[in-house]
Each structure stands twice: as structure tokens, then as C-alpha cells.
Image: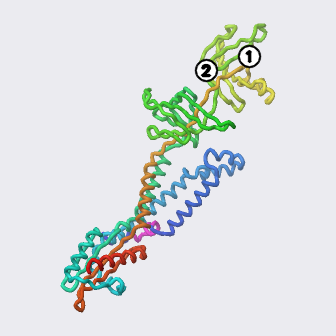
Amino acid sequence: MPKAKEKEKGSPFWDFFTSVRLTIAILILLAIASIAGTLIPQREEAARMAHEMSPAMVQLFETLQLFDVYHSFWFRIIIAVLGLNLVICSIDRFPLAWKRFKGSDGLERTAVFKDVPSHRMFSAGAKKDETSSRIAEWFRRHFRRVQAKNGKQEDVFYAEKGRYSHFGVYLVHLSVLFIILGGMIGSFAGFEANVNIPEGDTIDTVFLRRNGHPVQLGFSIQCRSFTAEFYENGAPKEYKSELTFYENGKPVLDTPVLVNHPVTFKGITFYQASYGSMAGDKILLRISKEGSGNEDKLVETGKGEIFSLPGEEGKFVVADVRADFMRLGPAAQIQVQPPSGEPVLFWIFLKHEAIKEMVPGLFEKSPRFNFQAYRPYSFFMQKVETKNYTGLQVNRDPGVSFVWIGCIMMILGFFLTFYSSHRRVWVKVFEKDGKVKVRVVGRSNKNPAGLDRELDRITDSLRNLTQ
């Protein structure tokens, strides 16, 4: 088995993923990708840049997913290779760290007492056994792991601190893996979406920022009210939405949402992002009949309400209302059902006269936009109801807990790596020339200056203790 394991570690695959060069190459690629993701506008912001580029260049950028770097397949591959590199490097080097952690040969290392500095050697005032007893008691109070070896000629004490510092770098590696895992979970299982909710309306669907696809929430949200406060210069001071969350048709949570004060429900976080006004369902129509000699009729109607034409020559309904249809302003779609035959569908605009001047012949040439599509009647939009809406940013990131755990582990790992060390201390008590001698030595895996200061303190404490 050991031979097979050594062969596996010596394979090209193992050597490749334990290479420091690979780690450096991955970090360089991540840096380049991050620069690209910073300099190139991403997702919604990429539209303006795309308009200034040639179609071939836009196609190239979309193929390489440069408009969405952090969700691209190649960025995920780089992250996955980094994770695999960390795992294999940790597995390859961990046995040596474990051996150092479990090492129990401290009492057998007699070579450490060679070339002991003179200021760490002193003569004790008590006898050898009494001196050893006092030193042993002192070590038990100040160190958790103490070993002793008693002999006729000499007694040796061994103590250590900070063994867990050997695992600091592995804790950092593990924290990076947790952060990578959290990012991957959020990338694949989470979403970023937007939704506009008119005041008083209820929704159960949001739309992805990346492609506009709808996502069912599994619950409903109602915007009970929306309020906005402004400074004297007209700049927004505060805007707030009062939301009610429903499950199975029953209200379960009433809560406000303000800027920088999001609310989380069922693992989905809602941020106050924007606000505005939109066309409501109510409009005021003016209907005239050519050659009738009668005054035009005003009809206040709502979306979906059916009315009879003034001359009882059919019925009409407002099928749709848009706040800005084809960038021509508020518009309504009228559906007229004649006494017999197919229904007639056409759009009418609030800014009828302005559009007529801006696009001459539009209404006459296109039946879809002809306000006289059902003669002898003409339909005009006189007024449209406006409603406030709240714009919410909706995020779901099930990997965020892994990222937080990774961050905490990284802090602990850095603390173990940079602010702690494995310090080992040996003390020899022996008799020479009728005197009891004491020698103090130590070793550390890092911070030798700190070890020297600690050995000096230990030497002074033991000298005072044994006088």
C-alpha cells in the first residue's frame, strides 16, 4: 500500500496539481479575469458598449462571455482548478504537519543542549531532586503538555505550546475552499432579479437581471403603499415601500423596505432599488362617429371592462395599457368586437398629435396604430391613470453562509499562521562539580526573536524559583 501511494503521488497528475507554478498561473489568470470584469461593463451595463461595437466583435464578446465574466464557464473552470489545486496540495503536505503535531520525541533530542548560551545556564541553590520538583511544578502551571525523564545523573523536562500553529495554513486553504464553494452554490442555485410592483398590486414572479426570464417565488408580495421624501432641490431623501408577504393566500409578514434596509423572506432578500410612476388600468377615452353630427362621447373605462359603442354597432374593451409603448409614450390597446366577424385590434396614443407630426403617415399606413381602424368610429386617449410603483432588487444566494464560514475560518487561519508558533522548551537539571546546574534551551517553527524573549523570561523565573 505505501508503495502504491508513493507511485500515485509521483504521477504526472499529482505532480501537476501540487506544483507551485500552477498556483501562480491560476492566480495570474484570476487577476486577468478580474481586470476584464472590472474594465468591461457587465450584464445590463454592457448594452451601451455593445451599441458602439461591430456585430462581429459583439458576437465574439458574447461567445467568450466577457459581458458576464463572473458567471462565465471559463471563470468557473479557473475557480474549480484553484480549488482542486488547494485540495491536492493540502493532502500532499498534511502528513508532515501531522507528524510535527503528534511528535513526541522531545525527550530523546539531547543534541539541543549543545552550545547553550551562558545567560541560559545557572547554578541552583537547592539540591537536584528539590530543584527538579520545583521546575516540574512550574512547567505544569505554565504549559499544558509536559514530559519528564528522571535519571541518576540528570533530569530532563520537555514542554511545548502552539502545536496547532502547524494547521494555520491548512485552515486558510479550507477557508478558501468554503468561499469557493459558497460562490459556486450562489452562482448555480442563486439568482439576481428585479421587479416593479405598482402600489396596491400583488406579484409572485420576478425577472432575472441577466436575461429577463421569469422566476416563480413560491409566495406573493403586495406593495401596500409607497412613499418618497425629497430635499428642497428635488433630490430623493428617502423612499420606502410597505410590503406584505403572503403564503397560500394568507398574510404572514408586514414589513417596510428602505434603501440600505433590506428584508429577507424565505432565503430571498429584497432591496429598495428604485421607484417611479406607470400607467394604471383606468383611462379616459373620447369616441367620435364620423358623419353622425353628435358630440363626441367621453368614456372612463378600465382595463378589461366591456362597453357598447355609442351607435350599438358593436362592443369594445381596453385590452392593454402601457406607460411607454415603443417609446411613444402612454398607449392603450383597443379591441372592438363587431356584431359579426373577427375582432379588430389597434393601439391609440395619448400624444396623438405629437406622434402625427413626428412620424407622418404612421396612423394611415399601419392598421395596428390607426385610431380609425373601426370606421366610422375614431378613438382618442384623453387621459391615463398613473400609479406609483416600487422597484425592488431581488437576490437569492444560498451560498452566502458558506462564504461567511470561510471568512471566519480565514481570520482564524491567519491568526494561527502569523500570530502563533510551535514553541518547544527543554530544561536539563544535572550535578557537576558538586553543584546543581540548570540549562534552558528552546526551538520554534517561526518568530525566533519572540522565542528568545520567552526563553529569557523562563530562565529568570526558574533561577528565582530554585535559589
Q: Is residue 429 above or below residue 12?
A: below
Numbered circle sitting on residue 332: none
Of the pair 54 and 298, the residue shown nearer to us:
298
Q: Which residues are magenta?
A: 9-17
Q: Is residue 317 above or below residue 227?
A: above
**How many numbered dots are placed on residues in this image?**
2
The x, y position of residue 77, in whole percent, is 51, 56
Identify the image quadrant of the N terminus. Answer: bottom left
Q: Residues within 10 Å of mark 1 (few under 14, many from 20)?
A: some
Residue, x 42% and y 76% (percent of image)? Answer: 448
Query: In the picture, residue 151 is in which quadrant?
Result: bottom left
Q: Is residue 382 magenta?
A: no
Colour setting: rainbow
The x, y position of residue 127, in whole percent, is 20, 83
Q: Residues within 10 Å of mark 2 (few under 14, many from 20)?
A: some
As helix, strand or loop, the secondary structure at mark 2 comes to: loop
**Which residue is label 2 attached to?**
303
- Left/right placement of residue 372 relative to residue 454 reads right
Residue, x 22% and y 79% (percent of image)? Answer: 132
Residue, x 64% and y 46% (percent of image)? Answer: 45
Most prominent secondary structure in the magenta stretch? Answer: helix
The x, y position of residue 322, in whole percent, is 65, 27
Of the pair 24 and 418, the residue shown nearer to us:
418
**Which residue is label 1 attached to?**
378
The three-letter amino acid code for the residue at tag 1 is Ser
Residue 114 appears in the picture as rendered: yes
Q: Is residue 412 above or below residue 461?
A: above
The three-letter amino acid code for the residue at tag 2 is Lys
